[in-house]
Image (cartoon, grey):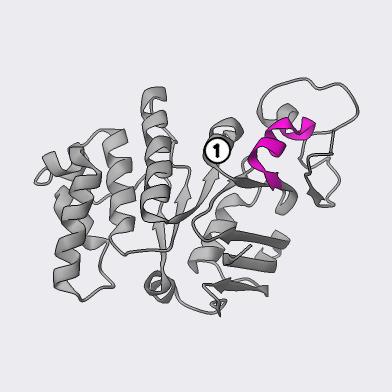
């Protein structure tokens, strides 16, 4: 695979706490990849490592063929990594257009920014209709769309999304997932996203990684993970016969690669 993002043997500590334990993962160009796991599994720390908000004690991060392990967050944004943070975090007192322009803060090409602003209004018609409205008055789903569009204003190659469906009504969840797929296909933007709901995440991802207590314990294609007994028991609430245990603190910490032949 032609990897756009590659993390290799990443170890992260918060003081004495070993938060990530030798994790290796990748995202291909134009690919959608999900990070699955419960609370305190290491999902958000992995995302922060990609964004440069957390520095690993050891291991490497490569993006678009260059090592960025020690690069700052702003340098990573300029390289082509954008973020849609948890709980959206739009600027509530600013208008929709002002929020979008803020997403292009690393750019200096005024003409290009104006063109992309118009393009975001076309891609997200509801945002175009509310361009002069304060972002804090938008619905939850509209704010999520705004956060996504704001990230795209930096012209990224990879968008990192942390719990994009959190707090949204079921009908809005479907809209957000559809939008992720649409932007991925139309703009060829790769997506790495954190999600606790495995079935939702794997419905749009091509591949996924399952984390438990700071370590990747499963990885594979989306359909293969959905069929895996450990994922079904841990995340889908299904009782599966046999001795397969769900990933978690009591599960063996040895990493597994899911394949079509695995039961």
Residue 87 in sight in this render = no
Query: At which x and y percent is residue 178?
Result: 40, 36
Q: Nearer the viewer, residue 135 or 109?
A: 109
* Magenta stretch, overall SS: helix
The secondary structure type at the circle numbered 1 is: helix
Residue depicted at x 22% and y 51%: 120
- Residue that mark 1 sits on: 201
Q: Is the residue 47 above or below the residue 220 in the image?
A: below
- Residue 241 picture quarter: top right
Residue depicted at x 61% and y 41%: 39
Q: Does 121 appear in magenta?
A: no
Query: At which x and y percent is residue 187?
Result: 36, 54
Q: Residues within 10 Å of mark 1 (few under 14, many from 20)?
A: many
Residue 154 in sight in this render = yes
Residue depicted at x 33% and y 64%: 155
Give the residues in magenta.
Answer: 220-231
Query: At which x and y percent is residue 35?
Result: 60, 47
Q: Does 226 appear in magenta?
A: yes
């Amino acid at each position: 695979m032609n990897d756009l993002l590659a993390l290799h043997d990443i170890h992260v500590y918060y003081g004495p706490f070993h938060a990530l334990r030798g994790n290796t993962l990748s995202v291909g160009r134009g690919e959608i990849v999900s990070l699955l796991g419960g609370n305190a599994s290491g999902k958000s720390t992995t995302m922060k490592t990609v964004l440069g908000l957390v520095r690993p004690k050891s291991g490497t991060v490569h993006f678009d063929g260059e090592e960025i392990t020690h690069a700052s967050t702003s340098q990573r944004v300029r390289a082509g990594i954008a973020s849609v943070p948890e709980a959206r975090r739009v600027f509530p007192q600013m208008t929709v257009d002002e929020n979008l322009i803020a997403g292009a803060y690393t750019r200096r090409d005024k003409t290009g920014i104006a063109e992309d602003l118009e393009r975001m209004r076309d891609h997200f018609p509801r945002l175009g209709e509310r361009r002069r409205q304060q972002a804090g008055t938008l619905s939850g789903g509209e704010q999520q769309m705004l956060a996504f569009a704001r990230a795209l204003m930096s012209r990224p190659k990879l968008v990192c999304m942390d719990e994009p469906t959190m707090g949204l009504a079921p009908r809005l969840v479907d809209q957000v997932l559809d939008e992720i797929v649409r932007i991925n296909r139309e703009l060829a933007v790769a997506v790495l996203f954190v999600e606790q709901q495995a079935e939702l995440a794997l419905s749009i991802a091509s591949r996924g990684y399952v984390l438990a207590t700071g370590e990747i314990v499963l990885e594979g294609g989306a359909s293969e993970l959905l069929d895996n007994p450990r994922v079904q028991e841990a995340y889908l609430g299904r009782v599966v016969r046999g001795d397969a245990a769900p990933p978690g603190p009591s599960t063996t910490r040895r990493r597994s690669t899911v394949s079509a032949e695995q039961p």
